[in-house]
Amino acid sequence: MTTSQLTEQIRLKKSFLCIGLDVDLTKIPQHLLKEEDPIFAFNKAIIDATQHLAVAYKPNLAFYEAHGIKGFQALGKTIDYLNENYPEIFTIADAKRGDIGNTSGMYAKAFFEDLKFDSVTVAPYMGKDSVEPFLAYENKHTILLALTSNAGAYDFQTQQVEGEELYKKVIKTSKEWKNGQNLMYVIGATKTEFLQEIRKIIPESFLLVPGVGAQGGNLKEVCEFGMNRNIGLLINASRAVIYASHGADFAEAAANEAEKLQQEMASFL
Amino acid sequence: MTTSQLTEQIRLKKSFLCIGLDVDLTKIPQHLLKEEDPIFAFNKAIIDATQHLAVAYKPNLAFYEAHGIKGFQALGKTIDYLNENYPEIFTIADAKRGDIGNTSGMYAKAFFEDLKFDSVTVAPYMGKDSVEPFLAYENKHTILLALTSNAGAYDFQTQQVEGEELYKKVIKTSKEWKNGQNLMYVIGATKTEFLQEIRKIIPESFLLVPGVGAQGGNLKEVCEFGMNRNIGLLINASRAVIYASHGADFAEAAANEAEKLQQEMASFL
């Protein structure tokens, strides 16, 4: 999927909502545990109920890896289900990978070729040769961690490096890597005050913004300071949507929460 | 496994060799491709041939994830084989994970509880709350990326932050986290000139040193500047050992290469 196709979907659905599929078996409705594959059963129900309200889904790999082979199977079924039934939806493997070149190449193969995700999140700490293998894929997208939404973001990301914060150094440096102009960036919604400055460095890039909802970010401010002429935003909500209800009405409740967010988003478009 | 047990094993085997199990199906002897599980067949042969020469094995997760469920099964069989047959050997999941707290907790569960690795490599970019969930496990070990062996290490890790390199800031900051005194650190062997200074900050910590062999590090210098009273070093070799031969004699050839390294290590003990 190209970024212009993504923008087109956003305009069509009047939504730049990304739903995080962070499936925790202790939090899903307990009747699903009787299913052969409870994780996939949950995801399928959530996707079917919300696909008209969201432009992207983001399974967080940790939640699948924690269940070993069963988790891996559920992940495979989820991405296949999305690609087969809703090919217009943008898919994000939230994996935060990054390793030396030949190893990052293996991760890129895993997420882009085997699992057929549109994009993957990548950590910048190991630098250029740890990210470029992901960038080598045409019409696949690499979403680089820049400024995350957690408390630990202040440990290193906001430290001054040569007169500017590390996350800015990461953005400026990565732009210059091969195909770096295609990068997207993770920018936490809990730090909207930084968005104006980020847009000065990367006016055109898509930003994946976690932290709205459970982590306390503010949608209005993110839109005000982060939106560009191609929208350029994917706002992620995970727990606030998928765990809106723990009962039999979980999918309907998720759709209600997603619709609230979509309606709010529509007002900014 | 405790670090004192690890030191004991090092003294017993006169080796601080870690063998990286970065299994690439295009590089293993082609007759193994007829096996039901070629990756595990390769690992088992390498492990059996080298287990008296190495104190640790380090499967690199990317090489398993790149094969989907089959890769995950091969990884599970490999760690189970190690734990059942050679419980005295230290195992490292080279995964370079790191995410917000609840997600890192899921990764910790995956590697420490389900797969039963002794340790996992973790990236520091997201700070304290992304690492502490790993540190919460007693007698499990978190190996934090500090200064890696690749070219991209110079992009951010060696940048000046408040008058010192970022990797030093990472080491100093992480030491203060809860159970931070138990951290081990990845320090690339290609950068031995930094080892003396690193030892001033963390005289007692174990260092996992990749980059000897294929990446051009120097074993003698690493020992000279990096060894402490508990040895405190695990030197990793991957491709130089496991791909010493591509023929039917691959396991024997790997053992020969491992023995060369072990003999050299013994001379420094």
Image (cartoon, coloured by chain):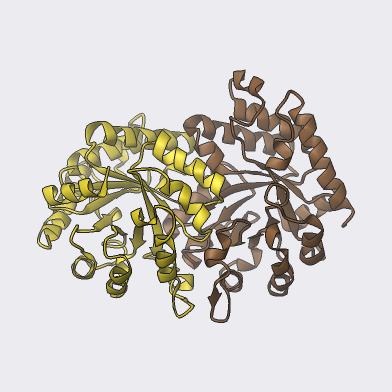
Chain colours: A yellow, B brown
Count of marks, rendered view: 0
Name the residue: 33% across, 36% down: A78
Relative depth, front residue between B261 and B71: B261
Residue closest to the far top? B34
Percent of width and height locating residue B141: 63, 56
In the rendered image, the vertical position of residue A166 relative to residue A129, given as above or below:
below
Percent of width and height locating residue B124: 52, 63
Q: Quadrant of residue B170?
A: bottom right
In the rendered image, the vertical position of residue A263 relative to residue B241, given as above or below:
below
Can the viewer see residue A264 in this picture?
yes
Q: Which corner quadrant holds the C terminus of chain B?
A: bottom right
Task: Answer left or right for B33 relative to A151.
Answer: right
In the rendered image, the vertical position of residue B236 relative to residue B178, given as above or below:
above
Name the residue: 16% across, 48% down: A8
Can the viewer see residue A97 in this picture?
no
Percent of width and height locating residue B164: 59, 78
In the rendered image, the vertical position of residue B31 relative to residue A168, given as above or below:
above
Relative depth, front residue between B56 and A213: B56
Percent of width and height locating residue B68: 47, 33
Relative depth, front residue between B193 and B52: B193
Relative depth, front residue between A12 and B229: A12
Residue closest to the far right? B267
Name the residue: 46% across, 38% down: A109
Name the residue: 44% across, 70% down: A169
